[in-house]
Image (cartoon, rainbow, N blue to C red):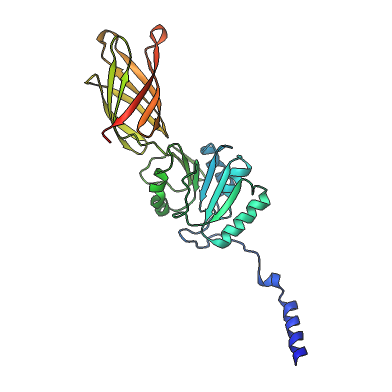
Amino acid sequence: MVRFILAFAALLAFAFPASAQQKPYEPQVGQAGKDVIWVPTPDEVVDRMLRMAQVGPNDLVYDLGAGDGKIAIAAAKKFGARSVGIEYNPDMARHAQGNVVKAGVEGKARILNGDIFVTDFSQATVVTMYLLPTVNMLLRPALLGLKPGTRIVSHDFDLGDWTPDRKTTVRKNTFLWIVPAQVAGRWQMKLPLPPIERHLDLELTQRHQDVSGRVRLNGVPTQLWEFVLAGDRLSFVVVDTTDRENEASLYFTGRVVGDVIEGEMTRGVGATRTTIRWRAARVGT
């Protein structure tokens, strides 16, 4: 009887080998996930997304919803960046990490098994996404809280009323946003320009990267125009009316660091051109 049982067990092992019982995991297009179904991003779109974000060797790319890992792999292999993919499905995450190894970029790319709403991606310089509109909107507060200058690229779906800094439509939409610095509030500075020192008082309002405001020069309202905010870099123009006989425009460029903005200001052209450093501080915060 014992011999019969052993022989029968051997026959089963021969008929149903372990390899047949445990097939390698293969993801299926359309399979359900926690927040989205899995649909791979076409290779040409992956390339476009990373080029739009100007990914390079100094970047740390986080791909939210990594799937089979192709975006994280491309960021490392084709653009030289470090990359991290976050994938909720543990089987998919293992599969994607296997793809990382096969691509020979395990030293630069890795796949984490985690939840994009829990896993910390605050160190990213670039974030890539192919999610759904509802998921994008749930992520938007965290994305807006990233370091100013961080580039965000989304395939197919936007971020509501946060206007993209760039959009392309080839096969499907691809959107790029640059996380803006927070400049809303009141700013003051002094400009040591002859014949008198100028005191500038700026009051700015902001909706994402769209900024408007009012300005007073030595207590007198004047024009503020061409305000552009891109990440932590800004530029704007103020009309200098303190010297009525020599009215001119003041061209400002600068960088926002918390409650301070520093940069260069140019007044005039040609032989009368003057360029000085300027520093503004946020007040009343």
**Quadrant (top left, top right, bottom left, bottom right) of the N terminus:** bottom right
The residue lying at 54 percent from left, 51 percent from top is 85
Q: Is residue 246 left or right of residue 117?
A: left
- Of 212 and 117, nearer the camera is 117
For the C terminus, which image quadrant? top left
The reply, left or right, for residue 283 in relation to residue 35 is left
Q: Position of residue 119 (x, y in %)?
A: 47, 53
Seen at 39% across and 50% down, the residue is: 137
**Picture quarter containing residue 46?**
top right
Q: Is residue 200 visible?
A: yes
Observer-nearest of 259 and 72: 259
- 8, above or below 238, in the image: below
Left or right, 5 with respect to 282, comes to right
Given residues 226 and 193, the one toward you in this image is 193
Quadrant of residue 242 within the rendered picture: top left
- Give above or below for 65 relative to 18: above
- Please give the name of the residue rendered at 62% of the width and 63% of the height, measured from the top-left corner: 25
248 versus 107 height, above or below = above
Name, please, the residue furthest toward the left.
220
Residue drawn at (31%, 36%) of the image: 206
- Can residue 28 be seen here? The reply is no
Point out residue 270 in the picture as x, y percentages from the top left corner: 41, 9
Report the residue that reaches farthest toward the bottom: 1
From the viewer's side, name the closer residue of 185 and 91.
185
Question: Where residue 142 sits: x, y (%)?
Answer: 41, 48
| Residue 182 vertical placement versus 238 (above, below) | below
The mark total stands at 0
Q: Position of residue 249 (x, y in %)?
A: 33, 16
